[in-house]
Amino acid sequence: MASKATSSLPRSVAAHAILISYTVLALFPVILIIFNSFKTRKAIFRSPLSLPDAESFSLIGYRTVLEQGDFFGYFQNSLIVTVVTLLLVLLFGAMAAFALSEYRFRGNTLMGLYLALGIMIPIRLGTVAILQIMVGAGLVNTLTALILVYTAQGLPLAIFILSEFMRSVSDDLKNAGRIDGLSEYTIFFRLVLPLVRPAMATVAVFTMIPIWNDLWFPLILAPAEETKTVTLGAQVFIGQFVTNWNAVLSALSLAILPILVLYVIFSRQLIRGITSGAVK
């Protein structure tokens, strides 16, 4: 027994070392951006890998970001679009996944395959058609247009992931609820959703990051000043010939904070959702 314990100890140490290494590699670009956002322009190019000191420390980038443009408005727009889209994707995705996994009907498999096609076919291929639809509906330069597009973009992956978890929910539990007289909506919201919460957190993380970082659809559908998102707003400091790197790095550092908070909120459930079924 002692030999087994001592042999498993190096494996555990090696696993932790590998985990720390991957964490450092993943966070290094983020840390580098934050450090350089507190430097002067000369220090950014002269020593980009060094920490800011008394000579190189500067807040000019953050002052520029706060003084030029409505950056708090950009943050508000990104938060509204991201949060509302997450709620819609999780709600409609979970309902569709529950229907596909619970009810058997003709064309059930084909319907699931049709919804899964959205994962394989990029929504950006339909940018021209989407723009024409939004122009016809009068939704150009509105946050509603972005919410609708991102909801359609996130639903295929949400349905694909959640339907697998929905099938693992015990049929005895759902049938017991039906015997007690619970409606299908009550069974769905009170019995099924709490059991697939880790999967929903996984879907939320994979959905919110592309939305927050997206530049394509805000530039096409909502380029007006009052509807700009954080990513689009940061492009103000990038010129054709001159780029204000202090402001760009400061804007990116500020843009990291909200998505980092959302990631921390969902992180525990995310890990449970990813590793569910991997360890018995």
Image (cartoon, rainbow, N blue to C red):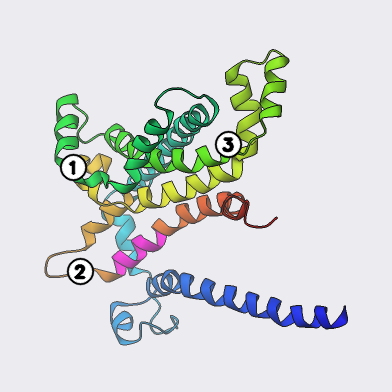
Asked whether 170 or 231 is in front, the reply is: 170
Instruction: Name the image quarter holding residue 2.
Output: bottom right
- 199 relative to 239 in the view: left or right: right
Residue 206 got which mark? none
Dominant secondary-structure state across the stretch colored magenta: helix
| Label 3 – label 2 distance at C-alpha | 52 Å
Identify the image quadrant of the C terminus.
bottom right
Mark 2 residue type: Thr
Residue 127 circle label: 1
Q: In the image, what residue type sits under mark 1?
A: Thr
Region of the chain picked out in magenta, as a range: 246-254
Residue furthest toward the front? 106
Q: Secondary structure at mark 1?
A: helix
- Where is mark 3, residue-wise? 167
| x and y percentages locating residue 59 in the rendered image | 38, 69
Residue 237 screen position, x and y as percent: 23, 62
Image quarter in which the N terminus is found: bottom right
Crowd tier of the residue under label 2, counting other residues whose Cα lies within 10 Å: few below 14, some 14–19, many 20 or above: few
> Who comes first in sequence, dot 1 or dot 2?
1
Q: Is residue 191 above or below residue 81?
A: above
Disc marking residue 243: 2
> Is mark 1 in CB contact (under 8 Å) with mark 2?
no
Q: Dot 1, how many residues are within 10 Å of its Cα: few (below 14), some (14-19), or many (20+)?
A: some
Look at discs 3 and 2 and give the one toward the viewer.
3
